Structures are given as C-alpha cells and as structure tokens.
Image (spheres, rainbow, N blue to C red):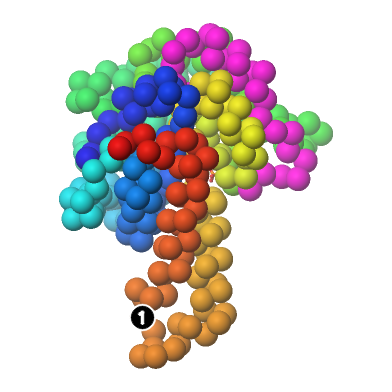
C-alpha cells in the first residue's frame, strides 16, 4: 500500500519506535526491502536520492517500479517513496513523478532562505497529500581540522522550521553519513532532548543510521526520533556477499554467468539486514 509518511511517523512517535528509511538503488534492493517489510509486518520508507533516481533513469521509473512491485509482490504494509536530500527543483520533480513523500534539504542555505523554500515545498506537497521532511542548518563539529563529532543543529532554528507545518524534521546531533570515524564522539543526546522540547510533537529524523551503536539508537527513539535512515550498511553487506560469491568461483559454476544468481547473495544479505534493523527500531509487527 503506497502512502505518505506522515501517519506512520506520528504513530511511531506515539508508540516510541522508529520507521526505517532504507535507500534504494536498483530493482534488487527495492525487492529486498519490500520483502523484509512484508515478512516483519513493518511499515517502511524507500529513500531515493537524486543520484539514485538518475541512475535508475529517472523518478518516473522509480515510481512505476515500486507501484508494480507493491502490487505483484502482494505488499500489504504501508510503503512510502521518499526523496532523500532533495534540492528545490528535485523536490518539484519528485512530486510531479508521484513520490508520496519528499525531503527538501535547504540546510546549506542561510536560515531565512531555507525557511522561504521549505514553506513553498510544504504548500505544494500538502496540496497533493505528500509528506515533507526538512533539514536545519548545522554547526560544524570541526576542531583542529578533525571532524570528530558530526554536525549539531541549533534548537531555535529547528523550532522555526518545525513551525512551517512540515511533517518531520532532520536535525544534526553529531550523526554523519557513511562509516563513522574512529574518533567519533557519539550522538549528542542532550541537544536532541533540547530540540525535542522546542518542537513538541514533531517526529524527528536520524540520518546516518549506519554504525550507530544499538543503545544510542534506542535512546534517541526515546527522545522523539521516529525515522532512521540507513544506506551505507546495505551497501556494505551487499558488496561483501557479492564479493564472497565471486571469490568462491560460484559465478562461474554450472551454466556460467547468470546475473540473477550473481545478485542473489547480496539481495539476501540486504533482506536479512533490513529485518534486523526493523526489529531494533521496534517497527516489526506494527503493520499487522
Ligand atoms: P548512512 O549511509 O550513513 O546509513 O546514512 C543514510 C542516510 O542518512 C540517507 O539520508
């Protein structure tokens, strides 16, 4: 069932669990994530970056592919197709193509410009029943040229963006995309608590879900995080399983090269990882 993401996040906030956003790059990952969601009876958000959209030939292909899979795989759990870190023009294109949810990332603009553009995207999206995620500019965590803590958002600015009527808010609390550096200082849960106090009942989004220790994930959910984005970890398990398959020479067994067989171990590894994350985030069983 294709839906916007606002209701699933509100339910998650109330029930003190989080919905996973897993980024898709191709047919195999999309199928793997939908399979994991259905088998765990978990609502799910399929994240699509502008780059991934281009790779898949465009947003329209993505929407049609997901629509087709939801129908033909008999998916009954709520599924949102969400633009990840969209530019202003990218958000408009995604809305046009039939995405059910968009992130407009204006965090690199001065706050007034971010507010202005976010407001416009909210108006257009909400008139079509599409949910909106916004991001607040961040204070760099750089010290002596070493980024050890990630970026920290200003709670006052978070409040200003939340008040625009967005559906959920991404705010930096020391989280970063990709694998965390060895000197990473962890999530700043004090700032998260401060942000939560300022924005009231607004679901918060934790980007950079790869590599955050389980106890920190759980604490952040207790402080209002209702959506957790995971991408790199899917890439890592996919690459690892594929490498192993090739190293063992299995790609050359039998009738020879078969792309369906070659991509199966990686796809299975993504299914397993996504199910583990859904259990950890507490969303498993919430779409019974
Ligand atoms: P990771 O790649 O660190 O898992 O982060 C994903 C993300 O936040 C996408 O927006």
Q: Residue furthest right?
A: 144
Which residue range is magenta in the image?
179-204
Label 1: how many residues lie within 10 Å, few (<14), some (14-19) or many (20+)? few
State the residue in front, 120 or 241.
241
Q: Is mark 1 within 8 Å of ligand 1?
A: no
Closer-to-camera residue (137/112): 137
Is 194 magenta? The answer is yes
Residue 156 image position (x, y, % from top left): 56, 10
Q: Residue at x 55, y 58 (%)?
A: 236
Q: Splitting the image into 4 quarters, where does residue 190 fall?
A: top right
Please tell me which residue is depicted at 57% across the width and 45% down the height of the picture.
210
User: What's the residue at 54%, 51% (across, down)?
Assistant: 233
Q: Secondary structure at mark 1?
A: loop
Residue 181 is left or right of residue 22, and the answer is: right
Residue located 50% across and 48% down the image? 276
Q: Position of residue 277 (x, y in %)?
A: 50, 44
* Image quadrant in which the C terminus is located: top left
Give the residue pinned by disc 1.
258
**In this orientation, which residue lies closer to the viewer: 241 or 147?**
241
Location of the N terminus by quadrant is: top left
Whether residue 269 is visible: yes
Q: Is residue 129 magenta?
A: no
Left or right, 142 with respect to 191, comes to: right
């Amino acid at each position: 069932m294709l839906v916007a993401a606002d209701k699933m996040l509100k339910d998650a906030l109330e029930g003190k669990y989080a919905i996973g956003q897993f980024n898709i790059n191709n047919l195999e990952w999309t199928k793997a994530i939908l399979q994991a969601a259905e088998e765990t009876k978990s609502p799910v958000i399929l994240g699509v970056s502008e780059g991934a959209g281009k790779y898949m030939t465009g947003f329209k292909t993505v929407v049609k592919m997901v629509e087709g899979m939801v129908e033909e795989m008999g998916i009954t759990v709520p599924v949102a197709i969400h633009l990840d870190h969209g530019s202003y023009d990218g958000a408009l294109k995604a809305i046009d193509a039939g995405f059910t949810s968009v992130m407009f990332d204006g965090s690199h603009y001065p706050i007034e410009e971010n507010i202005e553009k976010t407001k416009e995207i909210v108006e257009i999206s909400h008139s079509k029943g599409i949910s909106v995620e916004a991001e607040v500019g961040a204070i760099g965590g750089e010290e002596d040229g070493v980024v050890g803590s990630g970026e920290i958002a200003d709670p006052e600015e978070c409040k200003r963006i939340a008040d625009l009527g967005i559906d959920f808010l991404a705010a930096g609390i020391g989280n970063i995309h990709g694998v965390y550096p060895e000197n990473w200082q962890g999530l700043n849960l004090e700032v998260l608590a401060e942000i939560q106090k300022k924005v009231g009942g607004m679901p918060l989004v934790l980007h950079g879900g790869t590599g955050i220790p389980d106890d920190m994930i759980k604490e952040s959910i207790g402080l209002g995080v209702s959506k957790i984005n995971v991408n790199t970890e899917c890439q890592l398990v996919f690459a690892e399983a594929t490498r192993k398959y090739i190293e063992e020479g299995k790609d050359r067994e039998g009738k020879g090269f078969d792309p369906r067989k070659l991509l199966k171990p990686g796809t299975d590894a993504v299914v397993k990882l996504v199910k583990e994350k859904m259990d950890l985030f507490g969303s498993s069983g919430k779409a019974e």
